[in-house]
Image: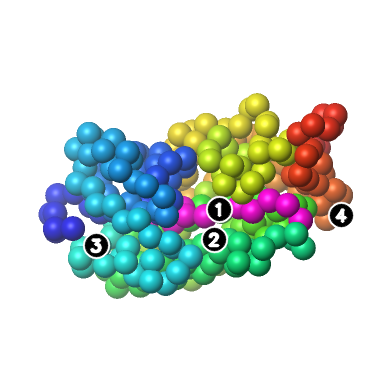
Amino acid sequence: MQPNDIRPLAVVTGASSGIGFQLALLAARRGHDLLIGADEPLEQAETELRVLGANVAAVRADFATRDGVDTLLAATEGRPIAALFANAGHGLGHGFLDQDFHDVQHVINTNITGTIYLVQCVGRGMREAGQGRILITGSIAGFQPGSFQAVYNGSKAFIDSFAMALRNELKGTGVSVTCLMPGVTDTHFFARADMLDTRVAQQSDKADPAEVARAGFEAMMRGESGVIAGWRNKMQVALSRVMPAPRLAEQHRRIAEPGSAEQQARPFV
């Protein structure tokens, strides 16, 4: 990307659709040029973002790998990054012992390893410059033992904790870190995680990804530590803090167990 003295650069991963695409839209509307990345096609996202007047570069790569992250960073061509939206991630349904370990490892490497490698690379440049904003997409899943999503929830517990710790380490540097913690959102997440036969995937009141992204973007711009998107999710996290872990795991089982969409509806909390 060629240097631009007027428009700051935002980097957004997981930007082909869902929350990531909505974050990219918000950044473009706020006057940023964009470098977007995903492991899925990006042509449609790139076209829609350019309509808003942004200069847009797109990188399709697997951000579970360091090579994928390096390819994304190389596309900045040394241009300073004003805002990083570390949003790439995906889930994995079914019981842990029934999952292919290659798939397990890909979730861990995407949600954790690739994310923190990207954040470290970008964060070092921001710290040297004395300014920058980082938004990391965690999840309220990080507060719950995720029966039939055990690896995903565990990965988000790591990310939620990591974001808060990094924020503290960067106090006084001019670099802010914000953690966006959505709940159930209307994206391709459940199809990709092979969870379409679960109660949670069939939930009719999923959050709008545009609203979730707006909550995260605005919290980042205010320099806040984190935001739980939606009042129901705030209530769910509050209950998770006081409810015994075995009960939380059982409740998660009710909504995430394969075939649970066909079972009689039972309240989650």
SS label for mark 4? helix
Location of residue 118 with respect to 24 vertically, above or below: below
Determine the residue positioned at 79% across, 31% down: 262
Local crowd size for mark 1, using a 10 Å CA cut-off: few (<14), some (14–19), many (≥20): some
SS label for mark 3? loop
Q: Amino acid at mark 4?
A: Pro
Q: Which residue is mark 4?
A: 246
SS label for mark 1? loop
Q: Which residue is mark 1?
A: 90
Q: Quadrant of residue 236?
A: top right
How far apart are the alpha carbons under marks 3 and 1?
25 Å
Q: Amino acid at mark 2?
A: Asn
Q: Earlier in the sequence, mark 3 or mark 1?
A: 3
Determine the residue positioned at 33% across, 59% down: 132
Tag of residue 76: 3
Q: Earlier in the sequence, mark 2 or mark 4?
A: 2
Q: Is residue 36 left or right of residue 203?
A: left
Q: Amino acid at mark 3?
A: Thr
Q: Earlier in the sequence, mark 4 or mark 1?
A: 1
SS label for mark 2? helix
Q: Cβ–Cβ below 8 Å for labels 3 and 2?
A: no
Q: Locate residue 190, reporting x and y percent.
A: 61, 42
